[in-house]
Image (spheres, grey):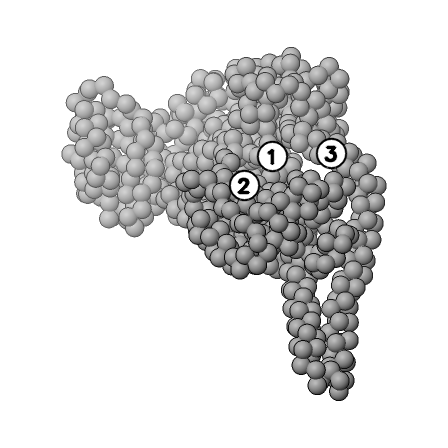
Amino acid sequence: MKIEESPRISEFYKLVLDNLKDAVIFCNPIGICTYANKAAERLTGYKTEEMIGKNPRKIILRKYWPLCEKMNLIAALRGKTPVFEVEIKRKDGKIIPVETYGKILKHGSKIAGLLIFVRDVSERKKLLERIIAAKRINEEIVKKAPFGVYIINKKGILEYINPAMVRISGAPKKVLLGLNVLRLPTYVKTGVAKKVREGLKGKAFSIGPIEYVSYYGKKRTIRKFIGIPLKNELGKVEKLMVFVEDLTKIKETEEKLRKSEKKFRSIVEEARDGICIIQDKKIKFVNNALARMLGYKKTELIGKDFLDFVPKELRKKIGEIYENRLKGKKVPNMYEARLLKKNGEEIFVEINAFVHEYEGKSADYGFIRDITERKRIEEELRKSEERFRNLFENAVDPILLLDRSGKIILANKKVEELSGYKRKELVGKHFVRTGLLTPKSALITIKNFAARMLGAEIKPYEIEIVTKSRGIIYGEINAAPIKEDGKIIGDLVIIRDITERKRLEEELRKSHEALKKAFEELRELDRKKDEFISMAAHELKTPLAAISGFSQLLKSESIISNKEVREKYLEIIEKETKRLAKLVDDMLDLSRIDLGTIKIEIKRVNLYKLVQRIRDEVENEVKKKGLKLILKLEKDLPIVTTDEDKLHRIILNLVSNAIKYTPKGKITIHALRKNDFIQFCVEDTGIGIPKKYLQKIFERFFQIESPYTRAHKGSGLGLSICKELVKLLGGKIWVESKVGKGSKFFFTIPIKFRKA
């Protein structure tokens, strides 16, 4: 640059220009370069002498020339251009993106030329591209995922839901958004709401599988929920991401650097980076950019100790770097630090410093760039990558990432669980060469993969997977291509294990074959119901007829005057009344059992005391018939937890039957422990039961026809009630008998009652 052809520039400003990180080029009024600083050499690859005398537009790609012409016009009209982006071609042929703006310089009223500032934005572009790529992968995973994903805020309000979750819920998306999941009846009932509250307090959770009827779909479903708290940079939970079977969109913004609206004073003042000169630890000079960066007026900074604007924990380190640089010791010229703004806020800065003379004395020249936004973007990228890894690793289903050739580049832990192989055994191999697919499935998968790489959309399809230890299982593939800049670079493959579904389908097929048999059984049950009603009516009529008949006879004058006959008739009426009452009670009990309304009251029961009480209750009846009642209870029987009243009724019914159908001999009550059960047996030496009736003896209203049984009228419901009560208590009942020798009625109950 020829001094006489440009504005007057002091030695100080020349020094500043050569140490600026941004390229600075000055062109005369006809567009010819007359000056370029060292940063311009580094940026373009051309030496200063190669640039001077030439139009710098030649290194700008031709497609940007119209834009440059437009900006020249704006500069001519307004005195400067806005910041805009173009691409330049370096001397080595490399094309790089740059950010630039220009300002008209004048000598008096005449235009001296155009001052151009140029900044390399390659790294920023790459950073943004990485964020965009990460965002695309996250969106693709959540969008294509077969499992539901939704996000709620601290109040439990649903703020985001993916397509799979919309399908799962059975409700339109507009109905779901804004829904408070903490109040959803199905969530409250199943305990999911409780877990969600824990998640909102910072505790990750996993609950399920849970089976319930969905609130909106009104269909029975089984779901598993995984919740991951989403925290802010301060470590506080803001939201909760829930997987059912988050994509948090990456918001990226880059704040445009402030444009100086103040009157052009000097090249230094127009620099976008902060510039300062420190001498004897005091700030001697500061430009507008640094003053704005820190939120001060320039007059408030001049004369202050520069360490006052450094956080306390960094002051010692920064002070040592400053002292050592002035002493000529080797220290980094460029490093990162933090500075304090006037409002107390900290900003991240990149400092480029060197020692030079100022007013005849050594001073430290510092060029300071605010990198707070870059740090924020890097932190966002780190969080985005962490969210992706979290989503990827905690996915309900196995997920593979393939490159365009079909090689596995990433696999989550569910792949290990499904296949039995460690990830290191799979990553790096072509998916066909892993041995995970049967030959038939390999052909289908290769065909579909190739189609997706050409842009075709392939619907989910089934394959056979060869696992390391479980043999062949069935899987469903849901895959989508991964794109970058519109080009397909790989494949996202989500695998769902449908082995259980296949098994259930096979069971469904088999159960369908059993429907005919079930239908016939239902018809038989219907017939038995009609038979039960008919027999119940018959059984009720018999005592009623006797009561009615003898009541009529008692009205006769001859009977009224005959005390002996009258008392006999009254005794018959009383007996039939009691029989009728017992029959009604038995029928009511059976009805309660059938309807499931009978109550079970569990308590600790001493079997010795219970059996002794039953013996006392039937003692008179036993003596009256001349029988013996013997108790044979095993020693050290444990205390059982069961319904004492129902156990009492079972034993009493069986003993009463034994007394009724034993003309002579004895009745024995046995009890012994068998593993976790107590086995009872009521044994008699009575008339016995014919073999052909043993299977029917527990049916309702069933009675053996014989002269002896007709003489001892019963309802035919006692053994049926015993059977149902034993079943309620968790046991079984059966009978062994020989005609003329007696019967043995066995039943079991668990020592500890377990609700079915």
Q: Amino acid at mark 3?
A: Glu
Given residues 552 and 456, the one toward you in this image is: 552
Res 679 label: 2
Q: Residue at x 77, y 34 (%)?
A: 510
Res 62 label: none
Crowd band around label 2 with a 10 angstrom C-alpha radius: few (<14), some (14–19), many (20+): many
Report the side of 127 relative to 477 (left or right): left
For label 1, the residue is 141
Q: Residue at x 54, y 41 (%)?
A: 679
Report the side of 314 relative to 690 (left or right): left
**Mark 1 or mark 3, which is nearer the start of the sequence?**
1
Tally of numbered discs: 3
Q: Where residue 569 appears, x then y in whole percent? A: 70, 75
Q: Where residue 547 appears, x then y in whole percent? A: 73, 74
Instruction: Label 1: state its secondary structure.
Output: helix
Q: Amino acid at mark 2?
A: Gln
Q: Residue at x 24, y 40 (%)?
A: 311
**Mark 2 or mark 3, which is nearer the start of the sequence?**
3
The quadrant of the image that shows the N terminus is top left
Please name which of the two marks, 3 or 1, marks the residue nearer to the observer: 3
Given residues 575 and 569, the one toward you in this image is: 569
Please name which of the two marks, 3 or 2, marks the residue nearer to the observer: 2
Crowd band around label 3 with a 10 angstrom C-alpha radius: few (<14), some (14–19), many (20+): few
Distance (Cα) linking label 2 and label 1: 60 Å
Report the side of 332 relative to 239 (left or right): left
**Rendered position, 716 above or below 112:** below
For label 3, the residue is 507
